[in-house]
Amino acid sequence: MHTLAKRVHNISPQPMALTFADGTAIEIEIESTKLFQTAFQAEGTHDDTRYRFVSDGDDDPVVAARESDDGWQPVGEVVAVERVET
């Protein structure tokens, strides 16, 4: 399983900061994570917008999509995950 996927799983459901490959960052609360051997899925909310995260294994990046009125829109690759102290 991808290292960042493990980190998301271990921090949730506590708030965390995610940084994407383009440098943007969000604070998010992950409501659910699912592990399937090396595959990973998670969903969370940031500013009333639903996000979905997936990875298919150790060498596969964690990628994100944001829900919109037109369906799921790609956000990008997650490159950093940090715990947010509350």
Image (cartoon, rainbow, N blue to C red):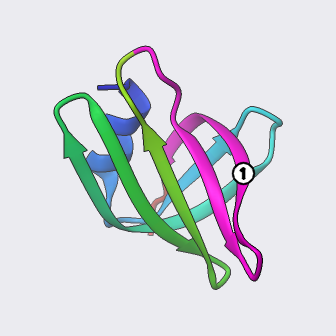
Depth check, front residue: 76 or 19 = 76
The stretch in magenta equals 59-82
Task: Point out residue 41 in the picture as x, y percentages from the top left corner.
Answer: 36, 50
Which residue corresponds to the image point at 45% horizontal and 61% vertical from the top-left?
85
* Residue 80 lies in the magenta stretch: yes
Tag 1, which secondary structure?
Answer: strand
Q: Main secondary structure of the magenta part?
A: strand
The outermost residue toward the front is 70
Could you tell me which residue is drawn at 74 percent across and 32 percent down?
21
Task: Specify few, some or many for label 1: CA neighbours under 10 Å numbering under 14, 14-19, or 20 or more.
Answer: few
Is 76 or 16 nearer to us in this picture? Answer: 76
Left/right of residue 14 with respect to residue 44 in the rendered view: left
Residue lying farthest to the top in this orientation:
59
Q: Quadrant of residue 72?
A: bottom right
The percent coordinates of residue 61 (x first, y second) are 53, 27
Image quarter in which the N terminus is found: top left
Q: Is residue 41 above or below residue 52?
A: above
**Residue 56 on image: x %, y %:** 39, 30
The C terminus appears in which quarter of the rendering?
bottom left
* Residue for point 38% across, 47% down: 8
Left or right of residue 23, residue 83 in this image: left
- Name the residue nearer the viewer: 18 or 84: 18
Q: Exactly how many numbered labels are in the figure?
A: 1
- Which residue, given by chain and number where applicable, does mark 1 sit on? 74
In the rendered structure, the answer to whether residue 57 lies left or right of residue 48 reads left
* Quadrant hosting residue 43: bottom left
Q: Amino acid at mark 1?
A: Pro
* Among the 4 quarters of the image, the one containing residue 40: top left
Residue 76: percent from left, percent from top:
71, 41
